[in-house]
Image (tube, rainbow, N blue to C red):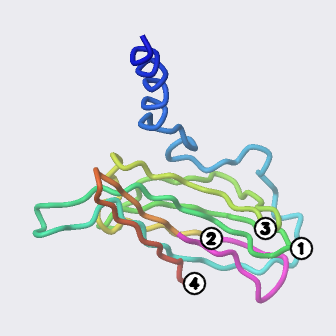
Amino acid sequence: MKLTSLFLLAIPLFISCHSPKQGPSTDKLDTNGRVVDISKYDSLTYGSTYLPVYSEVYERTQNDSYALTSTVSIHNISSTDTCFIVKADYFTTAGKLVKRYLSKPIKVAPLETLEIIIAKNDNGGGSGGNFVFDWATTRRGFEPLFEALMISTTGQQGISFIVRGVKR
């Protein structure tokens, strides 16, 4: 009887430890309440940033690849100034447009981070996918930070790495 009770108590614990967690919705950029008309701001500083994003990496040969989940993060590193993302375009390894994430500029509040998740099973960008972000800031010399975290785990094997965007 005690063994059966212990077993029944252990089942929910085992299932909860191995159930996949639900994260942010895949392949979206949260624009709710963020769309803004930047023509109201008369003295913005504009820039553009390139960010590589890897959907897969090769192991052993070019025929063996390891799929990755990518988290693209847009960080407003200022504690006082708002920044604006004007364009967020995702391209393939061959430079073809996969997706245009914005139709209108959006604001990113001070110290806020926005994310785009490229799912592990989404290999649309290929091994050398790219993002191009056009942005604007209210203060000269300040720019947002763009990073991508690529990660994958299978069994006891895992891989992860981070890349930062480069101003164009």
Crowdedness near tag 1: few (<14), some (14–19) or many (≥20) residues, C-alpha within 10 Å? few
Task: Kindly identify the residue that appears in the image at 66 percent across and 48 percent down.
Answer: 30
The magenta-colored residue range is 134-147
- Give whichever of discs 3 and 4 has the lower sequence position: 3
Q: Which residue is mark 4?
A: 167
| Snapshot quadrant of residue 70 | bottom left
Q: Nearer the viewer, residue 103 or 60?
A: 60
Which quadrant would the N terminus be assigned to in this image?
Answer: top left
Of pointers 4 and 2, the one earlier in the residue sequence: 2
**Residue at mark 1:** 80
Spatial CA distance of label 1 from label 4 is 22 Å
**Contact (Cβ within 8 Å) of mark 4 with mark 2:** no
- Measured in 3D between alpha carbons, the distance from the residue under mark 3 to the one under mark 4, in whole angstroms, is 20 Å
Mark on residue 134? 2
Answer whether residue 140 is magenta in the image.
yes
Quadrant for the C terminus, please: bottom right
Residue at 53% over, 77% down = 165
Q: Closer to the N terminus: mark 3 or mark 1? A: 1
Q: Is residue 13 above or below residue 136?
A: above
Residue 110 versus residue 166: which sits nearer the camera? 110
Residue 22 drawn in magenta? no
Element at badge 4?
Answer: strand
How far apart, in angstroms, are the residues tagged by discs 3 and 1? Answer: 8 Å
Residues at marks 1 and 2, CA–CA distance in whole angstroms: 21 Å
Q: Earlier in the sequence, mark 2 or mark 3?
A: 3
Q: Nearer the viewer, residue 58 or 38?
A: 58
**Mark 4 and mark 2: span between their CA atoms?**
10 Å
Q: Is residue 106 left or right of residue 60?
A: right
Pointer 1 or 4: first along the chain? 1
* Residue annotated with mark 3: 111
